[in-house]
Amino acid sequence: MTPGARDTIFALSSGQPPAGIAVVRISGPEARSTLTALCGTLPPPRQASLRGLRGADGELLDRALVLWMPGPRTATGEDLGELHLHGGRAIVAAVLAALATRPGLRMARAGEMTRRAFENGQIDLLQAEGLADLLAAETEAQRRLALRVSDGGLSRHVEGWRQAVLVLSAQLEAALDYADEDDVDLESTAAIRDGARVLAERITAVLRSPPAERLRDGLRIVLAGRPNVGKSSLLNCLVRREVAIVTDIAGTTRDVIEAPAVLAGLPMIFTDTAGLRDGVCDEVEAIGIERASRRIADADIVLWLDEPALAPARDHIIIVTPKADVATSAREGWRVSARTGEGVEALRTEIVTRARSLLPDPEGIAFNGRQRDLAQKAVSHLSAASREVDLLLVAEELRLCRVAFDSLVGRAGVEDMLDALFGRFCVGK
């Protein structure tokens, strides 16, 4: 390998063996020579061919499909080789051991293949974040949104906004370069300011959509009320498994209990909390009540299993009348019985209906926290440009807007978060 050249890396890119097929990927300047050493003659580029793979001692390791893909038109933007092996543990271990003995090769670190794709311009930062979410997706809605982002759907919107700002900047530069200060075309500069305002409104409309984290991490559903109203029983019933201890003793639940669940394909985290009451002397129970109050404040939806007059004043609260099989009151709210199952399915349906209004559309655009902050910065600069009188300051605001877009897609200013992002990937990615 030439001095200063990048390492060639390899990794098992499929699931852990045993499996029907195991895919080993090799990326970097020594990919071609490595494939040649293993299988002799290379197949034509991008054409899978059956070859015998041999170690340094000439021993046959496996008969596998071999793919040779010269860069830069590859997944990583580098020379790339793939070995499609029989997926037994011994075969995979033998091939990886043979690769490890090759000079200039090393095992890839977590996310290093995808990081090289990003660094070589094969994907942008938005697509990399979408791929990380796609690999972690557990529900259909998560898969659809992550696939849309990893496939460049969000990137295309951002690039469209960036191009619009470039056009405004070019028009402004023309006005500054080709007109005297006393002869500036006021109509054209007014149109530039108006264009900045309209674009800010378009991006703001997207920022109003629910955050991507709600779909990625799960909607937070908190069950709350006084002690012994039936929160733990209803939690077990809603998630269809025993996750909380249920007794007739008030104050049994003293800490928060979380239970992930999927309702109608939507990810949710149900949280049972300590019963709320005043005058508690027990220190442990008091801590539990304080934690319950925080969870209620942070919840996306609260299931209130108590008198409606005691419910916290907030949006997205569902009043529930628990123990409907023994309750005699006719108070408002959803009547349910964890013991008989009365009303539970209807409550699940109501939760799903509320959840759909709080989750991002898998077919639309949704920003995560990092993306939202940068998009808001772009809006702030566009809004400032639309109000600014001094044309030089308008030009500067438009430039700062472009900087925000560049950070959004990873063209600049993102080094501090790359390790954290690519660390979310497995070694093979």
Image (cartoon, grey):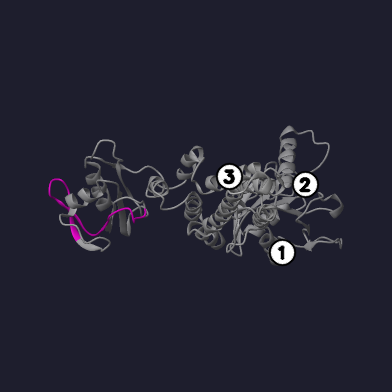
Is 122 or 325 nearer to us in this picture? 122
Residue 411 covered by magenta stretch: no
Badge 2 crowding class, 10 Å Cα cut-off, few under 14, some 14 to 19, many 20 or more, is: many
Badge 3 crowding class, 10 Å Cα cut-off, few under 14, some 14 to 19, many 20 or more, is: some
Q: Which residue is mark 3?
A: 399
Is 192 or 305 nearer to us in this picture? 192
Q: Label 1 is placed on what type of residue?
A: Glu
Q: Quadrant of residue 99?
A: top left
Percent of width and height locating residue 416: 50, 37
Q: Earlier in the sequence, mark 3 or mark 1?
A: 1
Magenta range: 51-75
Tell me the element at label 2. Answer: loop
Q: Label 3 is placed on what type of residue?
A: Arg
Q: Which residue is mark 1?
A: 350
Marks 1 and 2, Cα distance to the nearest angstrom? 24 Å
Q: Which residue is mark 2?
A: 227
Q: Is residue 351 left or right of residue 7?
A: right
Residue 392 is tagged as none
Tell me the element at label 1. Answer: helix
Marks 3 and 1, Cα distance to the nearest angstrom? 47 Å
Q: Earlier in the sequence, mark 3 or mark 2?
A: 2
Is 376 or 387 nearer to us in this picture? 387
